[in-house]
Amino acid sequence: MTDGLADKLKGAVDKVVGDAKDAHGEATDDTGQQAEGKLQQVRGEGRDTMGDAKNAVGDLGDRLKKSQ
């Protein structure tokens, strides 16, 4: 579960930073900054999903070991 947690934390940071960049870009009418922020948010979602997948695989492996 530790591997998945690291990905989920990195994903959360990417989403927060991306949201801030998007908001700053919108406030300053900087479409490049907005696009960078939106991309970083998507990257964060991907990392979060990867963390969920790693946790699920780890949990499944733990269950299989216990059932043997």
Image: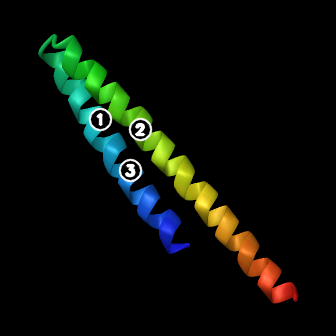
* Of the pair 24 and 9, the residue shown nearer to us: 9
- Residue 33 in the image, given as x and y percentages of width and height: 20, 21
* Of the pair 5 and 65, the residue shown nearer to us: 65
Residue 41, by quadrant, is top left
Q: What residue is shown with label 1?
A: 18
Q: Is residue 6 left or right of residue 49?
A: left
Q: In this view, does 66 lie to the left or right of 24?
A: right
Q: Circles 2 and 3: CB distance less than 8 Å?
A: no
Q: In this view, does 63 lie above or below 45?
A: below
Q: Residue flagged by tag 2: what amino acid is it?
A: Arg
Residue visible at 39% across and 59% down in the picture:
9
Label 2 to label 3, Cα distance in Å?
10 Å
Mark number displayed over residue 12: 3
- Residue 68 in the image, given as x and y percentages of width and height: 87, 89
Q: Residue flagged by tag 3: what amino acid is it?
A: Ala
Label 1 to label 3, Cα distance in Å?
10 Å
Give whichever of discs 1 and 3 has the lower sequence position: 3
Image quarter (top left, top right, bottom left or bottom right) of the N terminus: bottom right
Q: Circles 2 and 1: CB distance less than 8 Å?
A: yes
Label 2 to label 1, Cα distance in Å?
9 Å
Residue visible at 73% across and 75% down in the picture:
61
Q: Is residue 5 left or right of residue 53?
A: left
Mark number displayed over residue 43: 2
Residue visible at 42% across and 64% down in the picture:
6
Q: Residue flagged by tag 1: what amino acid is it?
A: Gly
